Structure formats: C-alpha cells, structure tokens
Image (cartoon, coloured by chain):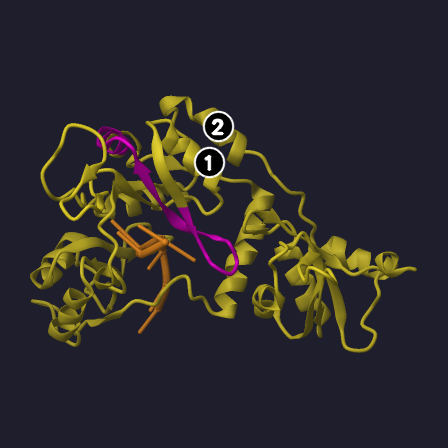
Amino acid sequence: MSRMVTQIISTMETQVSNGPSGTSLPNGPVISTNGATDDSKTNLIVNYLPQNMTQEEFKSLFGSIGEIESCKLVRDKITGQSLGYGFVNYVDPNDADKAINTLNGLKLQTKTIKVSYARPSSASIRDANLYVSGLPKTMTQKDMEQLFSQYGRIITSRILVDQVTAGISRGVGFIRFDKRNEAEEAIKGLNGQKPLGAAEPITVKFANNPSQKTGQALLTQLYQTAARRYTGPLHHQTQRFRLDNLLNASYGVKRFSPITIDSMTSLAGVNLTGPTGAGWCIFVYNLSPEADESVLWQLFGPFGAVTNVKVIRDFTTNKCKGFGFVTMTNYDEAAMAIASLNGYRLGDRVLQVSFKTSKQHKA
DNA sequence: TCTAATT
C-alpha cells in the first residue's frame, strides 16, 4: 500500500527541468567575464533523498557518474539530520547532464529522487513555497498549476492525497515559485478567491518551513525513525549501475540494536540511580568535542520536562569529553527519549543514550 | 491545514 501511495505521489510530482542558462561550451568549467565560475551547467540539486542516506553514500552514488568537484548533503545545523536534499557539482558539464538522465527518478527505499540543475543561489528564491488549502477535491495538480502559473514560474507543485483511499485529493497542496515575489503576488491574487466553478474559496499562504519543527513534530519524527529500525526499510532498489549492492549494504541492514521501552523498564528495577532528588538522570555518550548544552536541550526537550543538562568538558581545552547528562522529571518521557535517541545519528556520530547507572557512578 | 528545493 505505501508503495502504491509513493508511486501516485511521484506521478503527481512535477519534474521541472531548471535548465542551465547561457551559452554552452564543449568542456571544462565555464568562466564568465567577471571572473566568477559559472556552475549553472555542472551544479545539480538532488531532492527527495532517503532520510538515512549519508554524505558518503550520496557522494558514492553521484561519483559513479563522473568526477565530482564538490558535493554536499544538506543537514540540520543543530541535529545533523539530513534535510533530504543535497548538491553535486561536477567537473564536466557532460557528467551533470548524464547524472540527470540516469539518476533522476531513481527509487531509493520509499523515495523517488529528483535530480535537476541547481538555480544560482540567491535570497530571491528563498521562502517561495506556498501552502494551499480548500482546493476542490476534483482539482488536479495540472489544474492547480494552471491557476498559479499566471503569477510566475512554478518549480514544484503537489496535491496531498489520502493515505488510505490512495489518490483522493485532500484538498491541500504546495506550490513553489521560482521567486519569492511571485509567491507574494499569487497570495494577493488567489487567497480567498474561488477557483472557476468552485463552491468554496481557497486559502493561499506561505508554507511552514519543515526544518523548523515543533517539539511534538520532532518527537513524532524521532519516534518514527526509531520504529523504522524495528521493521526494517522497504526494499525497492533498482538494479541500475550495480549500485544495488552498495545501497543494500547501506540500507538493508540494521545498523544499531535499539532497546525497547520494555527492556528499559526491566532495566529500571535493577541498577538505576532512580528518581532521587530532581528526576531521572540520563547518560549521553559520543557527543562531539564541539557539543554544548543547547544540543542536549534541543534533543531531549521535545520528549518532556527537562530540568537540567550538562556537557562534560576537559578542564584545560574546554572541549566536550564525549559525554553529558540530562535530567528529566518524568520516567515515561525519559524512557521515550532514550528509546528514540539511543542509536540516533547526530552529525556523523551515533549516540548512545541510557539511564545513568550506579555502576558508571561508582568510585 | 503542512512536504524535506538553495549550499
């Protein structure tokens, strides 16, 4: 079922070719008259990457096409979590073209990746994503694009569909314009308006930024991440380029052995420090030397009441010694935080999170 | 009534 939904969504997803601008040259980096390198024919943006794909796997996949000048998987600054997209800049424009032709539409786990030319980075293309609700259920993605295209160039559009009836519009969607001012004009022109023949007016506003999650949403995401480890990933790798071995090795095997809440509960009776004083003390291991208290607040705060965090630092260098402690008031919230965050990847590290035991404390 | 599109 989820496969069916994925395919429907990917069918509805617009595949926009951004297309390089300017004149083509046969080979090598293109140098414009002002001396700056022109990346428009070599630099690609890759969207809809699987959440757990690493920088190394990303580079390996795109490096199979040709020599890479640089590449970057974009990650959340605080948690290090992948934001699901990245950039690849090839040395040779021909390889960029080849990557689009061969890797665009590749299915990885539950995702269908999109590979297209990156637009030149600029402030004017940011925050150009609109959230649209109240759409007639009969309105197709194409209809919606037609309605919005009078205000500017559409980069992506999507209508969300019901998960169970697979294909029935939920009446809500997204439109990303090339430029923010185009999005603003679309709000002015369409918010509160009835599309031709529609009974109700639509609402058009800027979409929430998915990387700025509420605590509840973060918890949900982490919980789902943890749950996915038990069931294992879905499997529909294509066999193209013999990358299946690489990808299966990376994705097909559980990397961590998670602990369940039940096993935590049984642990609780044995050697926990217990809720003496302020609350439940949690041991966090494998923090980076640069880790600070804010990281611990960000990680544990979504799970409930946190009364104290502490990063243990070296006395002379003031760098984190690799571990810290978090105190949480309520047992259930602490147990959920541990079950979700143990094995969690923070940047390029895998955290070990557990209740602080008396053993670790003994003199 | 909210998906991971700008380094």
The residue sitting at 51% across, 40% down in the picture is A233
Q: Which residues are magenta?
A: A73-99
Q: Quadrant of the C terminus of chain A?
A: bottom right
Check residue A91 for magenta coloring: yes
Depth-wise, is mark 2 or mark 1 nearer the camera? 1
Q: Quadrant of the N terminus of chain A?
A: top left
Amino acid, disc 2: Leu
Left or right: residue A287 versus residue A172 is: right
Q: Is residue A1 at all visible to an observer of this figure?
A: no
**Residue A65, position as x, y percentages in the image:** 33, 27
Q: Observer-nearest residue: B5 or A36? A: A36
**Residue A27, position as x, y percentages in the image:** 19, 28
Q: Colour of chain B?
A: orange
Q: Are labels 2 and 1 on one chain?
A: yes
Amino acid, disc 1: Glu
Crowd class of label 2 (few under 14; some 14 to 19; many from 20; radius 10 Å): few
Location of residue A122 with respect to A307 vertically, above or below: above
Q: Chain of mark 1?
A: A
Q: Which mark is residue A57?
A: 1
Q: Residues at badges 2 and 1 in contact (C-beta under 8 Å)? A: yes
The residue sitting at 18% across, 57% down in the picture is A178
Letter of the chain shown yellow in the rendering: A
Compute the Cα span from label 2 to label 1: 8 Å
Q: Is residue A214 at all visible to an observer of this figure?
A: yes
